[in-house]
Amino acid sequence: MTYVRVCPFADVPADGALGTEIEGTPVAIVRSGEDLFALNDICSHAEVSLSEGEIYNGTIECWLHGSCFDLRTGKPTNPPATQPVAIYKVKVEDGDVYVSLGSDD
Ligand code: FES
């Protein structure tokens, strides 16, 4: 599993999200309380950035039609989205955020 350095942890807003791109894949880095998550940044309903949405109750809300996605599973918790978004492994090392896009773990 290969982790890629993304950004300083301090760049991710508290209870917010940072949109970025890793090896051509759009990724949202999300802080929710003390927890850090990484998921695909494109809503599964239409192609808008989830990182521009609000974070609450362990979800990120798509700003366009209001579907919320569970930060741990990527699954939508309410319509109109019905498909999950991919989630990725994320860690903090020496103050920097690292993400693995691989599923080979
Ligand atoms: S584009 Fe995200 S819920 Fe419709």
Image (cartoon, grey):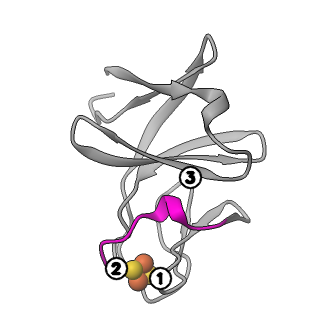
53 versus 71 height, above or below? below
Q: Residue furthest front?
A: 11
> Which of marks 3 and 1 precedes in the sequence?
1
Q: Is residue 36 left or right of residue 63?
A: right
Which quarter of the rendered image does ligand 1 occupy? bottom left
Q: Nearer the viewer, mark 3 or mark 2?
A: 2
Residue 81 appears anywhere in the view: no
Which residue is found at the position 49% from the left and 73% from the top?
76
Find disc 2 in the rendering and name its residue: 45
What's the CA distance linking mark 1 and mark 3? Answer: 21 Å
Residue 41 appears anywhere in the view: yes
Q: Is mark 2 within 8 Å of ligand 1?
A: yes
Q: Position of residue 2 (x, y in %)?
A: 31, 20
What's the CA distance linking mark 1 and mark 2? Answer: 10 Å
Q: Position of residue 5 (x, y in %)?
A: 42, 21
Find disc 3 in the rendering and name its residue: 72
Find disc 1 in the rendering and name its residue: 64
Q: Is residue 4 left or right of residue 104?
A: right
Which residue is found at the position 34% from the left and 28% from the top?
105
Q: Residues within 10 Å of mark 3 (few under 14, many from 20)?
A: some
> Which of marks 2 and 1 precedes in the sequence?
2
Q: Position of residue 18 (x, y in %)?
A: 53, 47
